[in-house]
Amino acid sequence: MRRSLVCGFSFLWVTFILALKPLEANAKEVTWVELADLTGPVAGLDVPGTMGLEDYFKDLNARGGVEGVKVKFVCVDTRYDVARALSAFKRYRRDEDVLAMGIVSTPLGKMLKEILGKEKMVITCPGDGEFQAHIGNFFTWGPTYQDAFAAALQWISEDWKKKGQPGKPKVTLLAWDTPYGKEPLRGGKEYAEKIGIELLTPEFFPMGTPKHDVYLSRIEASGANYVYVAAVDPIPTNIMRDAFAMGLTKKIQFVSDYWGPTALGVGTHPEAVEGMVIVSFFLRGEEAQNHPLTKRMWTTYRKEPSEKMNEMYGNGLVWGMNFEAALKDAIKRVGKERLTREAIYESYENLTGMSREGINGPCAYSKTSRRGSQQVKFYRCVKGKLVPITGWVAAPDAVSLHKW
Amino acid sequence: MNQKTALTFKETMVVFLMLPLVFVGLLAWGQTGAPSLDPSPKQIIVSPELLKHPPSFKGSGFKAGEAVTVELGLPQGLKLKGMIQEEPWVGIAFAKADEKGEFQCKMAPTAILNWFLQVDWTPDGKPDMTKAVPLRPGSYKVRAVGMDSDVVAETSLEILPQAK
């Protein structure tokens, strides 16, 4: 009898310890999956962003993680292909160690929104306003595309007045013929009406367009005073190259959205981009390269001088900072052993006002906001450099003006 | 003997209560049927011509309204461009199943360029055909996977050598 009891208890203890072991392992490492576009049309910006995120997690792990919880970084190069991204998403969807994901493609985001339904999971993504209009899993990196467009329209309105010009400025959108390219108008159009700016017929062009003369000729004929460009670097630089060759940069003020020229591009084609204005939610140019955190991380992990850093790298660091803060918040609320996607989701909603050391404006995530921040800065390309022309300014809420 | 095999009242009630469940299960199975995947054509030659006539896929047996990904099976030792390590499957097309659990889709140009032709991309977003590494000839597995249901339908796709 006694022997049976001892055997029984021993068996129970072994089972108990074995059952605890996976929990312990789970608590020590959580996973971030980045469905990145490291090759293809948006690689120019996504590669440095992804590098920043990867380096942030390396640094965080080197500091011991968050209360001992380390972050495993998994990156899949989706090559701007939704089929590949969906298949990779499926692979990690049921992995409980995966607490958050990052994506870069706007069409992919729209598909995942439908797939996930009410399932809670933080997915960080670019600035599609739909995710602010319908609050759910998708947390945008910065202000939405329409909010940035509205901020640019506000700047245009002030610039027009400063120049002493009469009447309303005429503005047109020149953008990729994609959901991203069209997004600024969903709310931006309404904002233009609200502040008395005349929006001309937009011009959309396919990705991979080698020359933009046709679109620029039509814009010139329409009498536009300002052109807002929505395409990913180096395309805005190519547009400026064509506009410069046509003599348009002297007549029209070109303004780019936040995926426009970075310091490296501006330095390579200074004459073409001269005078272009960029609305940005992250530090650019020397401000970014000389920022203590970006400089330390870049030189430590990439072992190159900071002049070789693309400013999107700083954004990648911000994605990492957000996750670290959410992880801290979740551990405080539920404990290491109960870290779930839902807990991280709720923690992202608690990041309101968090500082990102000035690389972005303060965090704007909350229960009612999916915007990474709501502040932008304006830069101008001057003699091969990106020079700030404003401090941080609040971007208007254009999303709420649109009927969704 | 007869008394021993006869069901008690309790047992009869359990069987009686289980019957609707069995019926519903059979009905659900009948609605979706066995999963299937049908590529068209079943044999292809990997060349830029595919961009004009992209391969397409039909399938059935999936959950109504769910997303379905079509994936190409990669034999051991084959790592496609953009892959950090070997992966057993790569997504090449996707669709949404209709109310009958059926779907139809075709490969997008990006999928043909990335996974069949394996091109490089120029910094301004154009495919660089001079760097293409077309998928080698052979018999490849293809499967359709239901995003929510985990239903899998598998078949094969023949990649033929280019005519010389």
Image (cartoon, coloured by chain):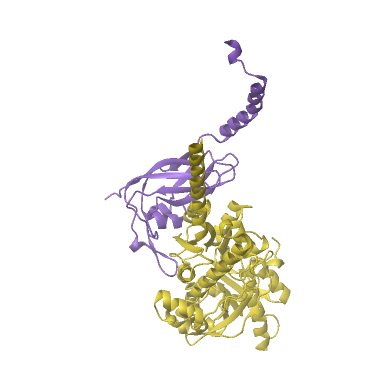
Quarter of the picture holding the N terminus of chain B: top right
Q: Colour of chain B?
A: purple
Name the residue furthest front: A2
Position of residue A242 measured from the top left corner of the image (x, y, whole percent): 48, 77
Would you identify the image quadrant in which residue B82 lies?
bottom left
Q: Is residue B73 left or right of residue A353?
A: left
Residue B144's place in the image compared with B24, above or below, is below
Q: Which residue is drawn at the image coordinates 36% and 62% (left, top)?
A: B129
Q: Which residue is drawn at the image coordinates 63% and 76% (left, top)?
A: A375
Q: Is residue A333 left or right of residue A384?
A: right
Residue B83's place in the image compared with B139, above or below, is below
Q: Colour of chain A?
A: yellow
Position of residue A60 measured from the top left corner of the image (x, y, whole percent): 49, 70
Position of residue A394 measured from the top left corner of the image (x, y, whole percent): 66, 77
Q: Is residue A380 visible?
A: yes
Name the residue furthest left: B164
Nearest to the observer: residue A185 or residue A311? A311
Position of residue A266 measured from the top left corner of the image (x, y, whole percent): 47, 81
Nearest to the observer: residue A228 or residue B157? B157
Q: Which residue is drawn at the image coordinates 47% and 44% (left, top)?
A: B144
